[in-house]
Image (cartoon, grey):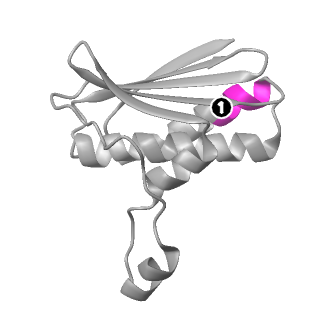
Amino acid sequence: MQDRIRISCSRQNLQQVRDFVRSFLLSAHRKEITVNQVVLAVDEVMANFIIHANGEDASQFLDLLLVLTDRQLDIEIEDHGSTLFLPPGKVATPDLRAYIQQGRKGGMGMALVSRIMDRVEFFERNSHTVCHLSKEII
């Protein structure tokens, strides 16, 4: 089972992405907790591409591909923007107490994605940044 969606790089499209992922996984009869976790992970990566990689330039777009086999979910997010956005390989787990003491906001999203998903990879393909997420789901 697979499906795909293309969105322009505007925060306003994040709800459409969340609804798309939720509908896809629920139609495959996956557990609600798993659905919520995956929706959160995809939303975070898409938001990072929209905000940080593309500066919310609605003339740029992202492609989201979901592929579900019996127990494996593979997600590919391709950024068609003009710059490569390749975060560092391993995301460190932030010190939550330090964040609270410093009053920091943000910066924890990719650590959360790494905890939710089994594998998170960023790479370049055809001069575009691609993020591949995978998770074994029941």
Q: Position of residue 74 (x, y in %)?
A: 59, 22
Left/right placement of residue 132 relative to residue 85 reads: right
Q: Residue at x 42, y 40 (%)?
A: 46
Left/right placement of residue 57 relative to residue 29 reads: left
In the rendered image of this protein, does residue 31 appear above or below residue 74?
Answer: below
Q: What residue is pinned by disc 1?
A: 135
Q: Position of residue 54 (x, y in %)?
A: 23, 40
Q: Position of residue 35 (x, y in %)?
A: 72, 40
Left/right placement of residue 97 relative to residue 118 reads: left
Q: Residue at x 57, y 40 (%)?
A: 18
**Could one spot residue 65 in this view of the protein?**
yes
Q: Amino acid at mark 1?
A: Lys
Left/right placement of residue 128 relative to residue 40 reads: left
Q: Which residues are magenta?
A: 22-27
Q: Quadrant of the N terminus?
A: top right
Q: Which residue is the extreme one toward the left?
A: 82
**Label 1: element kind:** strand
Q: Position of residue 24 (x, y in %)?
A: 68, 26
- Of residue 16 and residue 96, the one placed in the foreground of this image is 96
